[in-house]
Image (cartoon, rainbow, N blue to C red):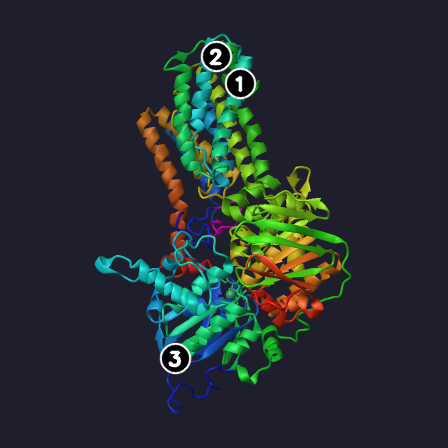
Amino acid sequence: MRDPGEAEAPRGPAPGTAPPPVLALRKAGKSFGAVRALREVSLELFAGEAHALAGENGAGKSTLVKTLSGVHRPDEGEVLLDGAPVEFGGPAAAQEAGVAVIYQEPTLFPDLSVAENIFMGRQPRARFGRIDRRAMHAEATELFTGLGVAIDPGRPARGLSIADQQLVEIAKALSRRARVLIMDEPTAALSGNEVARLFNVVKTLREQGCAVLFISHRLDEIFELCQRVTILRDGAWVAGEPISALTPDDLVRRMVGRDLDTLYPKQDTLPGEVALTVGRLTREGVFTDVSFEVRRGEIVALAGLVGAGRSEVARAIFGVDRWDAGTVEVGGRRLPPGSPTAAMAAGLALVPEDRRQQGLVMDLSIERNIGLTGLKSVRRGPVISRAAERDRARDWAARLQLKFTRLGDAVNVLSGGNQQKVVLAKWLATDPAVLIVDEPTRGIDIGTKAEVHRLLSELAGRGIAILMISSDLPEVLGMADRVLVMHEGRLAAEIPRERATEESVMSAATGRDGAAA
Amino acid sequence: MAHDLMTTPGTGSAPKGGAAGRSPLGRFVRWDVLVTALLIAVFLAGAAGSPDFANAGNLSFALGDLGEIALIALAMTLLVVAAEVDLSVASVLGLSSAMIGALWDAGWAIETIIPLVVVVGAVCGLVNGLLVTRLGLPSLAVTIGTLALYRGLAYVVLGDKAVAEFPQRYTDLVTGDVPGTPIPYPVALFVLLAIITGVVLHATGAGRALFAIGSQEEAAFFAGIRVKRIKLVLFVVSGTMAAFAGVVYTLRYGSARADNGFGVELAVIAAVLLGGVDFDGGKGTLGGVIAGVLLIGLLRNLLMLNDVATEIQSIVTGLLLIVSVLTPRLAAVVRQRRRSPAPHTPLSSEAESNR
Ligand SMILES: Nc1ncnc2c1ncn2[C@@H]1O[C@H](COP(=O)(O)OP(=O)(O)OP(=O)(O)O)[C@@H](O)[C@H]1O
Ligand SMILES: [Mg+2]
């Protein structure tokens, strides 16, 4: 293997001099039991440069991040700060050294306010050492304005959507004014607008000399933001090179180890009879008068900005939230409000947005998680058949190409993308008539994404009605037969596939007129 | 766990071994196996130390003496696995006993009294369950309240009288043995109910649902599990079982009093936790609980044979409770230290669980 450092030309703000990388990893290895998550991986972050880290699910990206930030101690190799070996005793030490990290999954304190979460441990002080709430709120508001979002700094973190939680994490990291900003899939739950705003902020930081490490499974984002990319495969370093030398296909080939056929394998299907009818559905203060139908064999996308009420509509349809007015019919049968059990019995399935809270029981095994939706289908008499339970889980794990050691392992040791596959498996195994997927490819790598798309397309081909919520606009355009756009809790437009473009969807989503109708 | 991080539920709880998940500790020793080994050790020590211990008469007595605790522990196991608890069980037992006394005094037939008090127990459980599921109150607080309430009702019903003259025909039902064996009737009944509980917990959909509810209620709800209804049923079962235990208790001692079974809830919970059920829910096995119940029973019997004062017995129960909660947690801390030598700030341990 080529030494990644070897080919490096001297770099840095002042040409001629070669300042050492601000933060670097040299020949680092990290194992979890039998799993070698990282082996001999090297990486250098320079001031003023945005560096991408790419790789499939489970390639070791998050492990690398945690090794850089002092959460994990490398088994082999070392971390270098300004060219000198350093041992961070823990994340606090890394923070003190100027390394700010946005971890893949938000870790907010639910009972504290948003502002308190942002300034945890370093609250601005007023006289007598009291926490200066007003300054804290003002600063938080300023951060959010920079990101172009309206989150009330005074509200508790509990109940924030995944996207909002992610935005709070971003604000937290930005507020540290760090020398190194590490972001592990910060955009996974964000839609185009928030991403654009985030990139503006990050570009400014970079120009001010901040070193950035950026992870994303959306390749266009990598090409837009970064100058260099390091690619991992199965924990090993594969490549480290300037972005400008790569095409997206090159990048995919290095990540996956083979060429990828189409990312959006949408089959054309003739829509059948109506499977899901939503009539004037209203939940006060959340969404109003939402009406639409989804036919068998159709993929309907629900697009919109973060906070437009898309997930809330999905939750109400499935019955985990109640609705105040309106009707939901599945296959002509009216659903009672507020009963997921009844919705399931009618053939509805919901792959929720927040897999760690709602999609999975993190402490239970892969097998038990997949089994949770099929407790009735694997019985012999009143007793569960272990063999049937196991076969069902193994079958679906194989169909989704889940990467795991044992079916009996708790899902919380899986990488993010593989966790998402378990959620999908759990619901596909119920053989639903209507499948609602909320951000089905959030945090999923490009190979698997193509796989999930193929699966959705195939399911639609078999006559399942699919309602897909996605913040990934290319995914919406690539997969949907029809696009419903929500804006501030109302349906703003319905755009058929032929007329769906980035512009038409975005202008409806931001409430500009003219695109719709 | 008010300040647990929202995306990492249960990271504060230490894993105990159990069928519900392969815990890191469980890879080396399963907690319930450990307790069973301890049980055998205590048994052998007891047999060596006291000639009165290891004979059929005493063991049969010891088992009988354990009847109420064992019966209530079955229902309690289901509750604790679902991350709830019922502290009012001993008071329901007392209320049941007091009602038996009062109604018997009033000339009712035992055949009517027994079903009636069992129904009252079910209602007591229903009240607990409604307060927890409809109003969303924590079961610890609710059942501390009803612990006082139901015991108070018991005194209202019977005052501080004792009603004692039950015909032998009835008391024989609980003190007698199954013909041809040294097994008391309540023990035989316990075995039957334990088998049913074990099957429900470990081999049915309802059992799977309980583990899911206990470890992550929201995800269970999103999977279409009727969380509230299941919890309500559990509280009703717990109340019913406690009232039934009250019948057994009253007839076994031949004495109905309002203060019967005072403090039994602690012994029950000690047995359940000692058996390896995680107080935070989601982990545990019924086998472990049975071992826990027997261990507590043997210890109590040994202490009694050696004329140890009841105060000391209470101290032992308390210590066992603390030890059984503490040990797995200490083991988890030690294990984490060994795995990564870095000092663990809250953030680091959270972030580590956050892959
Ligand atoms: N604490 C842990 N214990 C056991 N295995 C782990 C642990 N953390 C990570 N792993 C394993 O290490 C490998 C790398 O995981 P990592 O989370 O770094 O992947 P990733 O590249 O971030 O993937 P994703 O894109 O899905 O987020 C995976 O196989 C994962 O299961
Ligand atoms: Mg990751």
Q: Which one is in front, A335 or B299?
A: A335
Q: How far is the residue under mark 3 from the one under mark 1?
A: 79 Å
Residue B308 is at least partly visible in this image: no
Same chain for mark 3 and mark 1? The answer is: no
Amino acid marked by disc 3: Gly
Magenta span has A270?
Answer: no
Element under disc 3? loop
Please give the count of numbered marks on the rendered protein: 3
Judged left or right of residue B287, residue B14 is left
Mark seen at residue A265? none
Q: Which one is in front, A199 or A305?
A: A305
Amino acid marked by disc 2: Leu
The residue identified by callout 2 is B103
Tell me, yes or no, whether the two marked residues, 1 and 2, touch with CB atoms within 8 Å: yes
- Looking at the image, is A398 positioned above or below residue A384? below
Main SS of the magenta segment? loop
The residue identified by callout 3 is A209
> For the residue with label 3, is its CB less than 8 Å from the closest atom of ligand 2?
no
Element under disc 2? helix
- Looking at the image, is B180 positioned above or below residue A27? above
Magenta span has B22?
Answer: yes
The residue identified by callout 1 is B116
Question: In the picture, residue A118 is in which quadrant?
Answer: bottom left
- Looking at the image, is A324 positioned above or below residue A244? above
Q: How far is the residue under mark 2 from the one under mark 3?
A: 85 Å
- Of pointers 1 and 2, the one earlier in the residue sequence: 2
Which chain letter goes with mark 3? A
**Highlighted magenta segment, given as a residue range:** B17-28
Which chain letter goes with mark 2? B
